[in-house]
Amino acid sequence: MKKSKKIRDERIEKASNKLSAYMYIYMLITLMVLFAIKLVKGISPERYIIEILCFTISCIYMIISLSKYSIKLFTKYDDELKEIKTKILSKCGMICFWIIILGEFVLLFPGYLQTIDILFYALIWGIPALCITFYSIKHGLLIWGGTKRKASGKNDLAIRTSIGAIFYGILMGDQNSTALEHSMLVVSYG
C-alpha cells in the first residue's frame, strides 16, 4: 500500500475539522429526529438500526477520546484543546458518515429499507458532503501541491472513477453500455 506524500497544511486541516464537526452535529440532530419519528410510528427495528449504530459508536468514540485528553464537551478551553475537541468531533462525523453509507448498502439488498428510508439517509449524509465539498472548493482547501502531484492525483482520480463506474454498472445492471465506457467518458472530459 502506498504511503501518502501529501503535505498537511495546518490551516487546511483546522478548517476541514471545524466544518466536519459542524456537519457531525447536523447529522446527529437529523438522525435523532428521524429516529424519534420512526419510534413514534412504530416502525420495525431493522429500519432504525443505522441510527442506533451511529449514536452508540460515535458517542463511545467521543467519550473515550475526550476522556483520554481530560476534555469536557461543553467547557471552554485554550486553543490547543479546542482543536483537539474539534478534531474528535470531526472524526465522529466521519464515523457517522461511513456507518450511514455502509448501513444503507448492507440493508438495501435484503429489503430491510424502503425507498423513503434511503431518501432520508441520502439527505442526512448528502447535505454535509455537499457543504464540505463546496466549502473546500470555495476556500481553496483542495490544493494539489505541485505539478507532479497534480498529475498523479489525476491518474488516481481516473482509476477510482473507473473502479466506481464498474461497481455501479455491476450493481445497477446497465444493459446499453458498459460501466467502463461511462468512466472513460468521465475521465476524458474531466
Image (cartoon, helix red, strand yellow):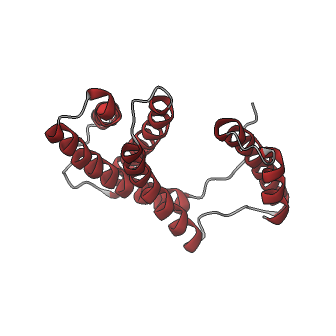
Q: Is residue 66 left or right of residue 94?
A: left
Q: Residue 3: image x %, image y %?
A: 72, 37
Q: Quadrant of the C terminus?
A: bottom right
Give the residue displayed 85% in from the left and 61% down from the top: 188
Q: Nearer the viewer, residue 30 or 2?
A: 30
* Residue closest to the eye, 166 or 24: 166
Task: Name the spot of residue 123 as percent of width and height, x first.
Answer: 41, 55
What residue is at 59 percent from the left and 65 percent from the top? 141
Q: Which of the 4 quarters of the picture holds residue 43?
A: top left
Residue 64 visible within the image: no
Q: Nearer the viewer, residue 27 or 41?
A: 41
Residue at image coords 48%, 39%: 98
Q: Is residue 133 left or right of residue 147?
A: left
Please determine whether, in this image, residue 189 is positioned above or below residue 110.
Answer: below
User: Which residue is situated farthest in the bottom direction here?
Assistant: 138
Quadrant for the N terminus, please. Answer: top right
Q: How many marks?
A: 0
Question: In the figure, 179 relative to 60: above or below?
Answer: below
Q: Position of residue 162 (x, y in %)?
A: 78, 45
* Front position in the image: 55 or 174: 174
Residue 128 visible here: yes
Identified at 79% across, 51% down, the residue is 183
Q: Horizontally, is 151 left or right of 138 in the view?
A: right
The furthest residue to the left = 40
